[in-house]
Amino acid sequence: MSNTHALLTHPIMRTLGWTLLHFVWQGALVALTYAGVALSLRRASANLRYTVACACMLLMLALPVATFLRLDANATAAAAAAAFERRALETATADAPDGAGATAAKSHAAPARLYANLLFVPDEEGASAPLQRWAENVFTSALPWLVLVWLAGALVLALRLVGGWVLTERLKREPATPLARDWRETLARLARQLRVSRPVRLCESALVEVPTVIGWLRPVILVPASALTGLSAPQLEAILAHELAHIRRHDYLVNLLQSVAETVLFYHPAMWWLSGRVRVEREHACDDLAVRATGDVLVYARALTTLETLRGQQQAGVRPVLAVAANGGVLMQRIQRLIKVQPATAGRSPLLAGAAVILVVLASVIACAQTFNALQTRDARAARADLPSKTAAKVKRKVAVTFVSLPAVQTFYNPRAEKDTRRLLATLAANQIRAVGFVNENQLYDEENGGRLDEERVRLLNLWLDAGHELGTQTRAHSNLYKTPLAEFQQDVIRGEEITGKLMSERGLQRPRYFSYPFLNTGATRETKEAAENFLAARGYRIHQVTIDNSDWLFGRVYAQARRAEDETTMKRVADEYLPYMERMFEYYEELSRTTLGYELPQVLMLTANALNAHRMEDLVAMMKRRGYEFVTLEEALQDKAYRQQPANYVGPWGISWLERWALEKGQPLGGEPGLSPFMRQFDVSRGGMDYNKLKAKQ
């Protein structure tokens, strides 16, 4: 029982099963393609149609092989990724304090927009329709059994093929009487006409009912006694020319390959239909060569009719047909084709009906392909997420949520600022998120009214404190240490504590204990960086070590500008692109954590307090939960050893995340960070874009 279970659950069974299912639409598409090509070639030579049919048959054989290799490569990559993730989970469990650095047991890939059709339509939230869920369960659970049924059918047909080969070998070994010298000379003359260079034996046999070619390298033409006595000399000569045409065209070898294709792909009707077309066109091509060699189409047509009469009713049972002689194809159609008699037709209606059928079949094939792709993607995703339950129970991803540029960005100047802030805080409270908000005190002053302190803006900070969140500082003027002298920067740090420190002391709280470098820039030189860090440490600050940096500020700025302009179309476009962008950034930093540290540490996410985050925070939280995150405080996240032990000596004009700083320390090249979409890049002034207002004015 255990061996059977191991066989049914082996990954190769899953891959082979999906390969067989994918061939359902692939084979139908190939057959449909051939039908269209053959229709356009109906006035071309039979040999050309035969060549196209053989090419399509080879394509049918190649497609499952290519599909299997592709799916197997994907499965191997997924298994390697899963193994890497397991190792990362084990490392996180063993090395990280209190399970820090954990990753979720089940990773959720970025949402894929699967194809939909009338029967398989996901709902608005991406959940599967009932019929789709049923199909997923049926196909996924039935895959191993489908493979076993396929193996059984292929085995039966393989035995049939071997039996045909054994019978053929028996025919070759059975004593056969060579025909008279005159017929051997006739055969030699026809061989020269048809340019058959290999020696061919001509023998009489009582084991065949029709003239038959046996063998490829040393072919033998076996002729029944009934043909020798029942056919006239010209008729028999025409039939021999037909058999020589098979030899010239290597049909014996091609038919062996055809039999293999029928054995392997027996379950698909398209394979049998196409194989039948190959046989028909092969006989037509050989008929053409025979007529060309003998020069008398009527003699050849009468020979076919007489030969069929002599053979009589075919016996029931299975008999190998390797290089079909004059019995191949439909006799009446072959004769009508030779003498140019066209069967009666019913005008254009059959053609129109055929076109309609082709369109319906094509639509069905596309729908089938999309459905199988969707199901296989979901199955692969489920397999990818199938990590040990014991490990999954121990380890979770963690993230600390922080906001910069409080009290608000792009909203503090209008009456909607308080409403947006309350909405953002309500979402944080509903999800039990305790955040740290870093204050840019310069934004507390109303420059348009003489730079006076705006109490309404201060009230926004009190809303954060009332909700139980902690405040940190960012300097007064949002000074960039790369461009600001150290002494001036230090004074700006002190000035940036005035209002924030006062608000916290009024509530009996300790002074701000976290500091966030504006633009995440830690200085132009290592000396400046170390001096600034010593200064901040002396004032009791812990650095805001951001690991998930992003451009949410750009999305928020464009969203706010479009909001002021009452441009709902742009607002919606920005909001729709925001969440997928953020999920890509999470994926990037999760992978960077694994490759740099060997595990996923508790992340520190930096966001800006803007209207976009106020309106879409619930969606952002849902995305993080879907990725397996639980929310921790900044204090809890910074307890991970990486924040205290990993050196981060990077200095330069660009502010980058601490994960990227640690990667640089280890000599890892940076790259692969997800970029902005073309739509958002047009607003990125730092990279050649244009401000929203200027772009709108230009348009």
Image (spheres, helix red, strand yellow):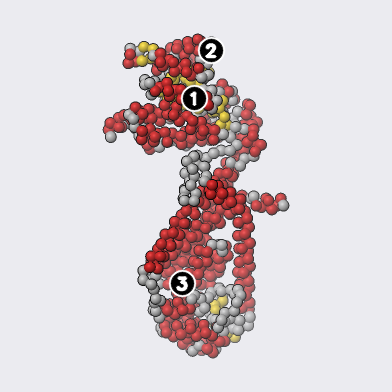
Mark 2 to mark 1 CA distance (whole Å): 22 Å
Q: Estimate the x, y position of residue 130 in percent, counting from the top left.
A: 54, 47
Residue annotated with mark 3 = 281
For the question of whether residue 686 can be seen, the reply is no
**Disc on res. 426:** 1
Residue 234 image offset from top left, x and y in percent: 46, 87
- Residue visible at 52% across and 44% down? 128
Q: Residue at x 42, y 59 (%)?
A: 359
The numbered dot on residue 509 is: 2
| Kind of element beneath mark 1 | helix
Q: Nearer the viewer, mark 3 or mark 1?
A: 1
Mark 3 or 2: the one toward you:
2
Where 240 falls versus 466 (above or below)? below
At label 3, the amino acid type is Glu
Q: Amino acid at mark 2?
A: Leu
Type of residue at label 1? Ala
How far apart, in angstroms, are the residues tagged by discs 3 and 2?
Answer: 91 Å
**Is residue 573 rendered to the left or right of residue 97?**
left
